[in-house]
Image: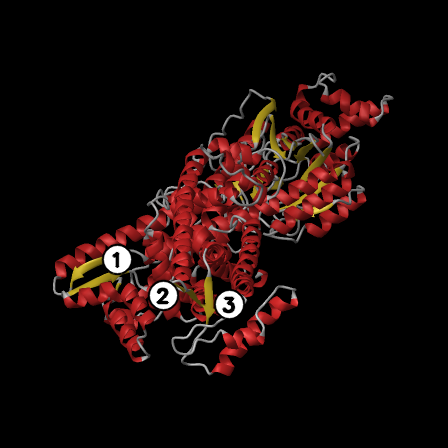
Amino acid sequence: MKRAPRPYTACMGRVYELGLALKADASATDFAIDPVALKAAQSGDGDASVRLERYVKAHESAGPLRASLDRVYERIGFAKACALTLAALLGCGAAGSAFLAGPETQNVLNIFWLMAALLGPHIIALVFWVLLLWRPPKSSALQSILAFVLSQLRRLLPKEAAADVAASQLLTGSTGRWNIAATSHGFWLSYLLAAVLLTALVLAFQRFDFVWETTLLSTEQGSALLSAMRAPLAAIGLPVPTEADILAAQRVGAALPQGQDNQRWAIFLIAAIALYGVLPRALLLMVSKALLARAIERQRLPLSAPYFANIIAEIYRAPVTTEIVDADEAPVPLSQVVEAKPLEMETINHLGQVIGWETDGDAVPNAIGMTHVDEEGPFLDAIAKSAGQPLAIAVSLLTSPDRGVARIFVAARASAGEDTRILLLDEAMLAARFSTQDARQRRADWWSLLVQAGFSAERVHLMPSPGAPK
Amino acid sequence: MTGQTLTVAIVGHTNVGKTSLLRTLTRDSAFGDVAARPGTTRSVEAASIPVGEGAIVLFDTPGLEDSPAVRAHLQAEVDSGQDWVEAIAHLSDGAAGTDQFAQEAKALRQVIGSDAMLYVIDVRDPVRAKHRDELEILMRCGRPILAALNFVAQSRDGEESWRDTLARTNIHAIAPFDTVAYSEGDEVALHEKMRTLLDSFAPLIDRRLADVRQARRAQLDAALGTVADLAVSLAALKESVAVDDADEKLIKSDALKQAVREKEEAVVGRILQVFRFDPDIYDGAHLPLEAEIWKIDPFDPNVLADFGLNTGAAAATGAAIGVGFDLLVGGVTLGAAALTGAVLGGGFDATRRYGRAIRDRLTGRATLKISAETLALILSRALALIAALRSRGHGADAKLTAVDAQQLVEEVLPIAKVALKTGSDGLAEALTTRLKKVLEPTKN
């Protein structure tokens, strides 16, 4: 029966993996955005993280990548099942080696051998794991070895983006740490459970005598070790061997103990393996699984990673729409570009009254009198008052030659004499503010405005900027 | 806030940067027409910025070119018994029968139909009578006014007199906002001022502000990530050459240089795309990879020396052609590693890292790769480009020429060395963080 795919959950698990798979699948040089996914991400609320997840889920490659991830995880699941089966077989083999079938009617179970075969490797592995957890290797040498081992494991997976992501999830980082821990504890739990079950089965259907023997330890030490192991079991009310039973079970020479309470020994052995082996491994497995789940839940797509940052930048590239809502069909004709003549020095020296339209300061140094006006009425009044005298009207090129100014200069021309000069000021500031082309166009627009207002083209001059070469 | 739409009319005298302001706010340098001529914008054009389920719609309006005449016309209407709002509505409806004010009528029509108006000021211009007339008309429209002071980065000389004039007109919501020299702080302040004027739109404006900030962050991350990717990919470029074969060295070093240039060009294009600028913001048709545009040739040891980059070691190992041989460096490092223990893992590490160098030495070949100094220079100018684009408004029409990368080179050199030394898959993210610290040292 085909398993249903694991569901997407917000901010975790599959979306994270899917996002990383998309990233791994994307070309490093050719950055492409999926428009449908982009639209999904842009619509609706949510911060960058939420929008990125919407993008990932809606991406056109999401389906195939999700299927790839499923395939990879199925493969990994199969490998894990094989490892657990192997662990169970090893556990059975280790337990079986402690049972010695006697030559005649008496079967013997070596207590220390059974304990050592089952609990020994488990305890050594447990200590090693705790040490690694407590002090993770920092030396580059050890890290290189680990990286090499992990790279070899990675080679067992297919060469595709989903496999890279799965390998990264399972072997590296916080999820890798707790996944390896959970797998390791699962392996030992399978080993110990199989051994305990085999031991219980054998003891259920065959009679064994229990012995212990040692070369390295003295009788007192061996006895003390067994006493220490039985104490917690006795504390919870299990029937355990007495001191006398322990001493009596020591094998000396070929003689076998007589009159043992074998049931007590059987219960003690099974309970000891469960308490010192199965129980801690089961607890550690649960803790590791819980921590793995928490690590997965805390995973967020790295928003500042180049690939995702690019997507987020696209998501926040607000799709601005524009439209003309009140159209004007008459374009402004470009003025004919005809430059005004620079004013010659002799003329400057003989300027009379100058009226400045929207000017400030000492803009025309050699004027006899300079009046600055920026209102239409006073401007026209001043022009009317200067009738019969040489007059120049100064205007800044920075002033926009717009429709309002044009209207006022038409009115000014009506009051001014034929010989009125127009001085265009601030050419240097114009050049500083605008591009060469725009400045040229501005001069032409002013020239055009003035000529259309009725001023003589010959009498429109560019006023040299102060400090400009004469 | 759901579905809320805020409409804002952008108004002001002609040629003060109304369209440029809209371009900068929408990050769209193609919006409307911008020129130094009056009457460039003659139609009302709307730009709708989506904000969640709602939107902020900005209307670009024609400039108020003849406000004295418009004011006189309105005053005459008022004198004849209408109130100001009626007179303005009459004019904007076109019912006044004055084609003379067709452009002003369009602008005023949009102002009356909007929730608020943004009055754009070129602070370089002195306050004139025509401006006072504009303000008089606009304040009679019965809509909240926010004044945006444009071109403040060029000169703030006229700002005080403008603020004084605005205060006298009872306009106190004023925000500096330069459409050419962009400042995120100014954009935030502009929105905050608008929020105080339009409290019923506060959630919408807050959301827009959050989007602006997030977009800026994402743009920077994306651009820096692209540079980090460039560092990793350039560091990975390698060519094996026969030590004694000058022709092969020349051909392959040229090929390597070309590959570097192409990658840099692609990254520059991507950075421009991230910040929503067109490649034509540069002078010339080509991106700034040619020495005559950037005034910098990243393969010239003399140029590198000018940037304070010591090319002595690299020059001794072949940097005269612009890239360095890694052979000696690899050999020395391997020797040092052996002396310090050569433990099993070290052996793994060294073999992985220097295996090719050892093999090359045995076969009389050398590895040609980019030098740290050249990589630092390329990364520095990419960072300088990012810095320039981050402070460039989309209303700017001046071309972007050479960017100043010199001050960044010293800080970037160690990053370039890390890229060349490490070269792992996860490096780009780490480099992004380090590059960000170079660009924004106070924020990290």
Q: Chain of mark 1?
A: B
Q: Report the Cα–Cα distance between label 2 and label 3.
A: 21 Å
Label 2 lies in what chain? A
Is residue A203 among what the camera can see?
A: yes
Residue at coordinates 78% horizontally, 35% vertically from top-left?
Answer: B139
The residue that mark 3 highlights is: A130
Q: Nearer the viewer, residue B380 or A384?
A: B380
Give the tally of numbered discs: 3
> Are discs 2 and 3 located on one and the same chain?
yes
**Residue placed most toward the observer, A283 or B97:** A283
Q: Which residue is mark 1?
A: B238
Give the residue type that dot 1 points to: Lys
Nearest-to-viewer mark from 1 and 2? 2
Residues at circles 1 and 3 in contact by the CB criterion of under 8 Å: no
Mark earlier in primary sequence (2, 3): 3
* For discs 2 and 3, the disc positioned in front in the rendered view: 3
